[in-house]
Amino acid sequence: MKAHYDDIAGQYAAYANASPTRRAELRTMQHMAGDVTGRSVLDLACGFGFYGRAMLLAGAASAHGVDQSPEMVALGRRVSASAGDAMTFQASDFLQLAPVREYDLAVAAFLFNYAQSLDELARMAAAAFEHVRAGGRIAVETMNPDYCLANGDCSKYGVRVLDDVPWQQGAKMEMEFPGDPPARITVFRWAREHYEHAFAQAGFTDLVWQAPCLLEQDRLAQPAGYWDDLLRNGLAAWFSCTKP
Ligand SMILES: C[S@@+](CC[C@H](N)C(=O)[O-])C[C@H]1O[C@@H](n2cnc3c(N)ncnc32)[C@H](O)[C@@H]1O
């Protein structure tokens, strides 16, 4: 079956590679991941492999990306072939992924915001748990539970939020990536306690929310005040937790 991102794989990669927030997002994921030297990494909803590839560059022993979009996976393979890195890829809904291996670290950037209900969020957290070894961790980037459209649509950071309406116990958001025409996606925003509950129910412990890791170099690279909106009302939030 054709996956939504199949039509916009290249457009998403172009946006992500040009995004002014991407370096800080990566730094935040790396901060949560800690020292990855020699670690095995599973990149859930890997897209074109941005995070898994970065973990390899940081010294991980292996990085395996899983994405339900065959076009995204094909793009990831092309990027890795041209970069000469050893990231491996698999086109699959991660909920269907057989637990053939337990990884030291799972990273999941913008995956759990596709849960359309709290039941689905719980199923997704439980599925992720199966792929992490005891003592391993998962680092997650997802939609900021505190985001409020009335306080800004985030377009200066690349993605424009078009709509944000109540949905079950959370919110449903319509957003677009730049391009001609812009690419529309729908995501779901859940509260902090929803994530905390789903991941605890799955068996994860020690869930810690992480603020974006902005450095002096980020501030110097942009006009004064550029990052204020990101800190006040950014689109993303991060957390990590452990499989005991
Ligand atoms: C916004 S992209 C993020 C890609 C990558 N993590 C990044 O940050 O560059 C979201 C990705 O999630 C994938 N995705 C959504 N639900 C999925 C699922 N159940 N299993 C695997 N991939 C999924 C989509 O195909 C898409 O490539």
Image (cartoon, rainbow, N blue to C red):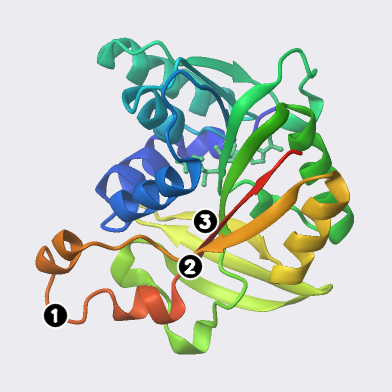
Front disc: 2 or 1: 1
Q: Is residue 142 above or below residue 12?
A: below
- Mark 2 to mark 1: distance in Å? 20 Å
Q: Quadrant of residue 106?
A: top right
Res. 101 in view: yes
Relative to 106, is 160 above or below?
Answer: below
Identify the residue position indicated by label 2 in the image: 235
Q: Nearer the viewer, mark 2 or mark 3?
A: 2
Any part of residue 4 in sight: no
Task: Say which label, 2 or 3, has the lower sequence index.
Answer: 3
Q: Locate residue 135 relative to residue 96 in the image: left or right.
A: left
Please, is residue 83 above or below residue 166 in the view? above
Specify the amino acid type for callout 3. Answer: Arg
The C terminus, quarter of image = top right
Badge number at residue 224: 1
Q: Which residue is mark 3?
A: 184
Residue type, numbered disc 2: Leu
| Secondary structure at numbered mark 2 | loop
Which quadrant would residue 157 be assigned to in this image? bottom left
